[in-house]
Image (cartoon, helix red, strand yellow):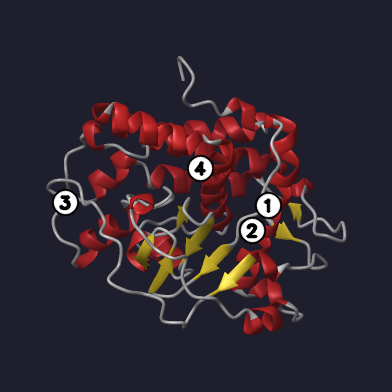
Amino acid sequence: MELNENARIDTSQVEDRRGSGGGGGGIPIPIPAGGGGRGGLVGIIIAVLVALVGGGFGLNAMSGDGGEAGDNTALEQKCAADDALQQLDCRNTLYVNSIQAYWQRALPEAFGERYTPSKTIFFSQGVSTGCGQADSGVGPFYCPADDQVYIDLTFYRVLADQLGAEGEFAQPYVLAHEYGHHVQDLLGTEAQMRRQQQRDPGDANALSVKLELQADCYAGAWAKNATGTADAQGQRIFTSISEQDISQAIDTAEKIGDDAIQQRSGRPVNPDEFTHGTSEQRKEWFTRGYQTGDPKSCDTFGSGS
């Protein structure tokens, strides 16, 4: 993966709330039965990954006012410097720029709908959102109540050190998945799925899996088209994405499958508790999006999917 050093990093697409002390009691995370507590390595893995790349378990059922305003001054200065691409937060901002540039074009082309941009909120330890208070333990998530993506960037250390997903391309994959949830929100897919869950609680987990796999597929469609994305001045954002990069995304998808998480926590694999999909399913749907490059191929809710 190579980023274009001449691409302008648009920091207006993110809001930097790190160090603002926006945390509170934290969003309660539903630990599956038998998962144990949140202390120690197993507890950390469960607490972080049970909501990983999944739009935030239970978030949209909570109340909140959208949180405090961020201050992008330091981020703007950092991302205008010559070494901006060496900085984690600036690279992630550029990933967000690419993902949103893709959907600005792809959403009207594929679905005939206008794309409304969403900000990504960088926070540390805790944050107030339109879906309630959250802490870093929930992992990256999308809040449909305020249409924003939230991430504590230290999460990537957990992803690399505790799960072995060390590749750089794991980072844009995570963000692209969360923006897949934003697309679902814009298309009404998320709201329709929630209504179906209410009508048929017994099918709630299976419906959640379909939502998550579709977001994986959307991430794959972005990855296929990422080298065609550009900044406001027309400069390409990515100069290249290699097959190794795609393998890193697939490796990450496999490591965060429901079955892989259950096995890593020392628990038996229980399909009844799946909410995000198995490793094989996540790999399959990301790969489908990547191979086709077409978000219309991502109908996980269709018959036979």
Give the Cα separation between the discs numbered 3 and 4. 26 Å
Mark 3, secondary structure of its residue: loop
Please give the residue where the numbered disc 2 appears in the rendered image.
96
Q: Which residue sits at x=41%, y=71%?
A: 127
Tell which circle, 4 or 1, labels the residue nearer the N-terminal end.
Answer: 1
Tell which circle, 3 or 4, labels the residue nearer the N-terminal end.
Answer: 3
Please give the residue where the numbered disc 1 appears in the rendered image.
100
Give the Cα separation between the discs numbered 4 and 2. 19 Å
Please identify, in this view, whether the residue under mark 3 or under mark 1 is nearer the observer: 1
Q: Which residue sits at x=78%, y=62%?
A: 4
Please identify, in this view, whether the residue under mark 4 or under mark 1 is nearer the observer: 1
Give the Cα separation between the discs numbered 3 and 1. 36 Å
Percent coordinates x, y for residue 59 in the rendering: 36, 53
Instruction: Name the kind of residue labelled 3 in the image.
Output: Gly
> Would residue 161 be visible to someone looking at this image?
yes
Tell which circle, 3 or 1, labels the residue nearer the N-terminal end.
Answer: 3
Please give the residue where the numbered disc 3 appears in the rendered image.
35
Please give the residue where the numbered disc 4 appears in the rendered image.
250
- The answer to whether the residue labelled 3 contacts the one labelled 1, judged by CB atoms less than 8 Å apart, is no
